[in-house]
């Protein structure tokens, strides 16, 4: 059962001069006075701005998008746990996309797991989408392993390893086509959720943000509780040397930063944020990978600030080995972080309990889709409802009776 946890003000309705009744909560289509963030969600950063954005789309129609891409950075041993082996990380984005659209994988057997047998965060994404009934679309920014489903194709190619210093081809084209897609998805929806599946992407995100000077140290997360910070820092230093850049040297050229040390997803999704946010609010679904996307979008067009929130998970926000709040504050203090209070600690399945032990944390827009589901349902969908659906889906995928 859904529980309606939206709180209304005790203030009386106000008659206007023509004798009509005006609800003080809803003026010009935007909920204002008395609006409260439901218990299933929490906010870091500018809470008043978060309330303003959320109240404006409360109970309204959203659309979920997930941009998939490969970077050969993920095949470097030790960089990514988003696959049972480094080579299998190339299958993860395609498999995640297939799971979202088909409910099963075609490009590989089973579902994407990390070496500990922990399931992809797409299980949470799909559960949120199932409950909310939101439309969902896949964008191929550049995959070496292409998903076997219908998708939007921007004409990109998979990213090279960042150690080459030449990571992404046709970066300007990818960005501009992302703008077109963002505008397209904003046309018939009240808000747009933009997310990713790109294994190895925290390393390319780190490199991109350091090249832009957004951060000067490794603050990005990892799908493992043992964040390989030394390895990532070593790879970024090697990449900078190959590209002939230094920390902050590309502060005024975000796309050049992506071209040198980023990945195709960053370019496309940055464009989508710029294109969509000119028309509707945007929920940027993801963790420190999507922080790099936000950094590039803000660097290209600062007008996005004020109409975007980052939607993520409690696991990511509370990660002791990364600092999403510090990263976002380094980009702009007026980008609120709204996170879903999912808790797998009492789940009967060890693979899900592992999220509470520091594994996975984010990915495939699981936080953004959950935040969007709660918003679009005006709080009728809760974390408990989503967890019940995760369990049902988990049993279905794994064939558990």
Image: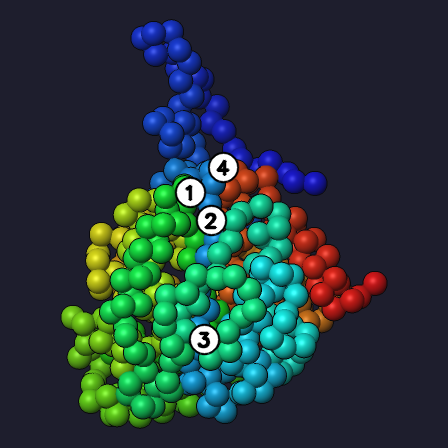
- Relative to 210, does residue 311 appear above or below in the rendering? above
Q: Nearer the viewer, mark 4 or mark 2?
A: 2
- Who comes first in sequence, dot 1 or dot 2? 2
Can residue 291 be seen from the camera position used here?
no
Instruction: Look at the image and tell me whether residue 3 can be seen.
Output: yes
Say which residue label 4 marks.
59
Q: Which comes sooner in the sequence, label 4 or label 1? A: 4
Calculate the distance from the C-alpha at mark 4 to the C-alpha at mark 2: 13 Å
Q: Earlier in the sequence, mark 3 or mark 2?
A: 2
Verify CB contact (< 8 Å) between mark 4 and mark 2: no
The residue labelled by disc 2 is 63
Front position among marks 4 and 1: 1
Residue denoted by label 1: 189
In the image, 118 versus 301, the foreground residue is 301
Q: Mark 1 against mark 3, which lies toward the viewer?
A: 3
Q: Describe the element under mark 3 as helix, strand or loop.
A: loop
Q: Nearer the viewer, residue 109 or 10?
A: 109
Neighbour tally class for label 3: few under 14, some 14-19, many 20 plus, Cα within 10 Å: many
In this view, the residue farthest toward the right is 401
Q: Secondary structure at mark 2?
A: strand
Count of numbered circles in the view? 4
The quadrant of the picture occupied by the N terminus is top right
Q: Please provide percent x and percent y for residue 2.
A: 65, 40
CA–CA distance in space, label 3 to label 2 = 23 Å
């Amino acid at each position: 059962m859904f529980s309606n946890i939206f709180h209304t003000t005790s203030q009386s309705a106000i008659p206007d001069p023509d004798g009509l009744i005006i609800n003080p909560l809803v003026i010009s289509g935007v909920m204002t006075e008395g609006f409260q963030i439901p218990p299933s969600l929490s906010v870091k950063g500018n809470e008043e701005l978060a309330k303003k954005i959320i109240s404006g789309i409360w109970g309204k129609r959203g659309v979920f998008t997930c941009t998939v891409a490969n970077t050969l950075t993920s095949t470097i041993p030790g960089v990514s746990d988003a696959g049972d082996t480094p080579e299998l990380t190339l299958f993860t984005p395609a498999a995640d996309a297939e799971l979202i659209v088909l409910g099963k994988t075609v490009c590989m057997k089973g579902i994407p797991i990390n070496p500990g047998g922990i399931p992809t965060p797409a299980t949470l994404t799909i559960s949120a989408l199932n409950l909310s009934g939101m439309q969902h679309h896949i964008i191929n920014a550049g995959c070496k392993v292409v998903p076997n489903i219908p998708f939007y194709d921007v004409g990109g190619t998979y990213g090279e390893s960042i150690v080459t210093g030449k990571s992404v081809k046709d970066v300007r084209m990818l960005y501009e086509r992302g703008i077109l897609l963002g505008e397209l998805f904003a046309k018939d929806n009240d808000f747009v959720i933009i997310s990713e599946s790109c294994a190895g992407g925290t390393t390319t995100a780190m490199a991109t943000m350091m090249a832009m000077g957004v951060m000067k140290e490794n603050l990005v997360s990892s799908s493992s509780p043992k964040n390989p910070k030394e390895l990532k820092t070593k790879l970024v230093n090697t990449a900078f040397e190959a590209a002939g850049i230094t920390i902050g040297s590309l502060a005024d050229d975000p796309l050049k930063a992506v071209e040198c040390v980023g990945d195709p997803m960053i370019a496309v999704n940055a464009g989508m944020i710029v294109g969509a946010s000119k028309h509707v609010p945007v929920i940027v679904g993801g963790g420190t990978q999507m922080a790099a996307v936000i950094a590039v979008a803000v660097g290209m067009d600062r007008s996005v600030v004020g109409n975007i929130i980052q939607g993520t998970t409690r696991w990511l926000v509370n990660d002791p080995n990364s600092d999403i709040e510090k990263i976002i504050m380094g980009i702009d203090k007026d980008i609120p972080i709204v996170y879903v209070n999912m808790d797998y600690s009492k789940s009967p399945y060890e693979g899900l309990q592992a999220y509470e032990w520091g594994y996975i944390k984010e990915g495939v827009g699981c936080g953004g889709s959950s935040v969007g589901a709660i918003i679009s349902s005006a709080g009728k969908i809760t974390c408990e409802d989503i967890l019940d659906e995760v369990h049902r889906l988990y049993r279905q995928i794994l064939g558990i009776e």
